[in-house]
Amino acid sequence: FGFKGCQKIRGPQIRSLLEAKDFFLFDCDGVIWHGEKAITGAAKVVNALIRQGKNVVFVTNNCTRPRENYVHKFCRLGFTDVMLEQIFSSSYCSALYLRDVVKVRGQVFVIGCDGLRRELLEAGIPCVEEADDPDATIYNCALAPDVKAVLVGHDDKLTFLKLAKASCYLRDPDCLFLATDNDPWHPLSGGRILPGSGSLTAALEVASGRKATVIGKPSRFMFECISSQFRGVDPAQCLMVGDRLEVDMLFGSNCGLDTMLTLTGVSQIEEAQEYRNSDLSTNQSLVPDYVVDTIADFLPAFEE
Ligand code: PLP
Ligand code: CA
């Protein structure tokens, strides 16, 4: 395409891009919704693509819910045609990684929300049960003898004790160190932010002197999960749509996919242009192939 290369595309260009691709990967927060509010027009776009027979999947680094909850959320927000099989979250992919890649034997110590633990249990992966003992400290608590992996994700009930226990488990070189994602922070309304899984992982990396293996975007593993569940996925036929250059564009580029930045989320077009103009060659992987203001800009392409 003559219009490829970190620039805003419009009407006829969007139409020919949508015609050329048959597999669409959408990031969720900042692309499809903001928290509990759908982006205007997003549901129409997703429903129209699905009805046209395009493959549509969702790739989210939000590890706090099991996939079923996402199906309900999609439905609640008007995305009526989305099914469980289309949802690839960092919690689901972490469960697949533990079950199918490392075939973990023994328990997993989880720093994360209940949703992450539920996804692991559904895949048959035993998690260390946390006793609710207010007097427990790292000096007197019991440590499980058979912990074979520490998995870190967003945890809104993080305690010092959990960090301390995880640091102890990680002393064992045979205990794997995994992170659902490495997102630094997430925007909330009113200018507030939420520290992301990456900030918790960083704490444990310092304490353990080790580096976590990241499961979610920008790691390729999520795309491997998609490829193994959808027959004949051709990266050349895929478009990855996201709002964060360092996560979504890098993910697309790591997987050999065309990338599109939508300006309804975290990253601005000026940041993309700065990466493009920088001399650092690794920065080029963060530059989107296409930019739109919102995925609602796809809508005219579905009209006759
Ligand atoms: N993790 C948490 C805890 C979040 O709240 C969010 C966004 O709200 C994300 C990850 C990022 O999700 P996504 O990859 O869909 O943008
Ligand atoms: Ca996002």
Image (tube, grey):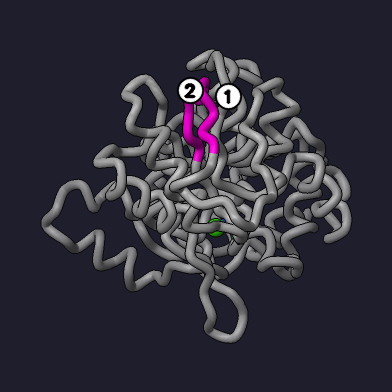
How far across and how far down the image is residue 138, in percent?
46, 48
Give the quarter of the figure containing the C terminus: bottom right
Q: Which residue is mark 2?
A: 148
The image quadrant in which ligand 2 is located: bottom right
Q: Is residue 198 left or right of residue 133?
A: left
Relative to 48, residue 147 above or below: above
Q: Is residue 100 visible?
A: yes
Q: Is ligand 1 within 8 Å of the beta carbon of the residue shown at mark 1? A: no
Question: Element at badge 2?
Answer: strand
Q: Is residue 82 left or right of residue 298?
A: right
Residue nearest the viewer, comparing 117 with 194: 117
Residue nearest the viewer, comparing 70 with 47: 70
Relative to 231, residue 171 above or below: below
Bounds of the magenta span? 142-151
Q: Amino acid at mark 2?
A: Lys
- Residue appearing at x 50%, y 25% in the figure: 147
Give the quarter of the figure containing the N terminus: top left
How far across and how far down the image is residue 142, in percent?
54, 36
Q: Which residue is mark 1?
A: 107
Q: Is residue 9 visible?
A: no
Are discs 1 and 2 less than 8 Å apart at CB? yes
Q: Amino acid at mark 1?
A: Gln
In the displayed orientation, state which residue is furthest to the bottom.
Answer: 190
Q: Callout 2: few (<14), some (14-19), or many (20+) C-alpha neighbours within 10 Å? A: some
